[in-house]
Amino acid sequence: MAKKNTYNAESISVLEGLEAVRKRPGMYIGSVSRKGLNHLIYEIVDNAVDEHLAGFCSFIQVTLEADGSCTVKDNGRGIPVDLHEKGVSAERLVFTTLHAGGKFDDSVYKTSGGLHGVGSSVVNALSVYLDIQVSRDGFIHHDHYERGIPTLELNQGLLPVIGKTKETGTCINFLPDPEIFEKTRFSATEVKSRLHETAYLNPELTILFEDRRGESPEVSEFHEPEGIVGFIRDLNKNTEVLHEPVYLKGENEGITVEAAFQFTNEFRENVLGFCNNIYNAEGGTHLTGFKTTFTSVMNNYARELGILKEKDPNFTGTDIRNGMTAVVSIKHPAPRFEGQTKTKLDNQDASRATGKVVGEQIVLYLDRNLETLKSILSCAEKAAKIRKTEERAKTNLLTKQKYSFDSNGKLANCEKKDPSQCEIFIVEGDSAGGSAKTARDRNYQAILPIRGKILNVEKATIDKVLANAEIKTMINAFGCGFSEGYGNDFDITKLRYDKIIIMADADVDGAHISTLLLTLFYRFMPELIYEGHVYIAMPPLYKAMPKKGKEEYLYDDKALERYRKRQKGPFTLQRYKGLGEMDAQQLWETTLNPDTRMLKRVEIEDARLASSVTEILMGSQVPPRKAFIYEHAKDAELDI
Ligand code: TSJ
């Protein structure tokens, strides 16, 4: 009797938990956009990765099914199905118990192994159905849930058995709930990228990915026996590298530390941190430890080699990491996370352990590899030189004009103040800017013209970009500041516009402007992109005017091809060269009017992708950038 009561009490709290998750899904999975949707897969897969880390699973298969569901299968021991003390199968508890607080709940820190094993009940609650088969002890045990509620009758607390097997493992099939998610199509690109990363971090694991949604199924296998060294090679695959990747590993205070790095001839650093296989978007103590030690070791070498003279100041950390690509991956028994998205590692012992391991191992390597050491130091010298020039330029600027962000320049603001209803167009060129100001609905549309030639400096350094008055006006107009590295002064809640729309010509200069703006956003205001506020206007290339019938705007050459096929009678074709050529009425119809315009939302789901994308975007050639835009063009939304 007592048992039954506990179970009833238990089921009530299960229902309450379910309701909490379904009411505020963002609290548990971050968002209900495609990013949150993909997250469901990671929550499930992480459990299988844990089983791998425990030493019992070597293979994980992830399938995007034709019906929109996802199947994840491992060859681990199988989730325990025996009776738990509460009188139900242990498996039921895994899928119905909401573990204290959500990942994105401010009040709670994640404990051991990040959030592993905690997310499966959340995935369950947010799925139309979740079906599970556990192969264990010679039998296949079956369970099924609908929107988090179990639908199968238990027999004395135990799951129904649907077959015999000699294998062991867990297989889960689930369908995300369209009542919850804005988008229900998983992004194969994002999922693959994350699985590939998991494979790099777990060199003995094999992950098979299959996408069965298209005409012909696509299969990828991820197995990276080189581990994070392979990760570094992959991150640097499109850049000129200066030496072979360096790999360090050690243990300190019960924390395992692994790091790999390689310098390139690019003027940027890309240092990624992972704790217990989880990416730390906001960095944290492991990265601090790595960076501090690396800086001090390299400064010592620079003095020993006479590159820095007695009177010279040290290189800064940024100087020394100029061109560096690095992955720091630690295993910590009890990690704590802080920061806006709870992805910043907070344990002080992680900083000590990483510093210690890196400090010991790096000198062992560099003492024997002087060529590598010299390449790294020459990167630092170059960076220091540029920094000094820029510091001088900035001081000059400061004396002439206060380095502030409160000018409003040429911004033609809108009248409404409610951010959810407002849009800002960043328009290339004064003439297009002028037409846009006339054409807009001043009620809710703001226009900020930006002159192309100011920014038309190949690979303008970010300092120059930030010193640009129009860029300052832009940052000021957005209202949310900007963040540099991990020092974060950015506050997205202060954003004054729901849509930031880049409006540039479809030519080289236009591409350049969009490139710089997107790069700027990635680096200093990435949340704008993650939260889907950034759009690119797609002005049409042509206007077709038939002798009989309606005029039509055509947005690309494919559209023109289709038009030619379907248009029987004669027509005149007007080709637009640029935004500047349209009059106010045309500009309104093609680019400003929400009922007729075409917008493409810029979507990058993860910071890890941003670095390589930035590279593509920063590159001086136009074609790769085009490829980027086109790859994401499938996400293009006809904004009607
Ligand atoms: F495959 C998968 F990704 F779909 C998935 C696998 C999803 C979930 C929610 C869990 C798992 C999973 C869990 N794979 N392997 C396990 N292992 C256990 O839960 C397990 C097995 C045995 C023992 C033991 O002590 O005997 C303990 C645990 C935690």
Image (tube, rainbow, N blue to C red):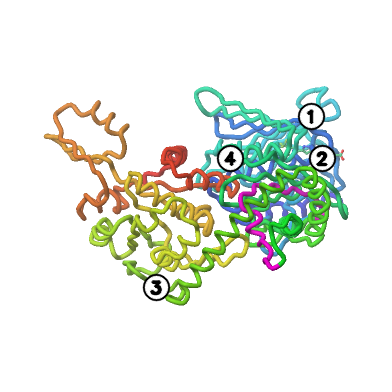
Q: To which residue does mark 1 refer? A: 135
Which amino acid, by three-letter code, is at mark 4?
Glu
| Residue 443 vertical position relative to residue 517 in the rendered view, above or below | below
What SS does tag 3 mark?
Answer: loop
| Residue 419 vertical position relative to residue 231 in the rendered view, above or below | below
Q: CA distance from mark 2 to mark 4?
A: 61 Å
Report the span colored magenta: 311-334
What SS does tag 2 mark?
Answer: loop
Residue 240 tag number: 4
What SS does tag 1 mark?
Answer: strand
User: Circles 3 and 1: CB distance less than 8 Å?
Assistant: no
Q: Disc 4 beta carbon < 8 A from ligand 1? A: no
- Nearer the viewer's eye, disc 3 or disc 1? 3
Give the percent coordinates (x, y) of residue 220.
62, 28
Q: Earlier in the sequence, mark 2 or mark 4?
A: 2
Q: CA distance from mark 3 to mark 4?
A: 41 Å
Give the percent coordinates (x, y) of residue 608.
60, 47
User: Circles 2 and 3: CB distance less than 8 Å?
Assistant: no
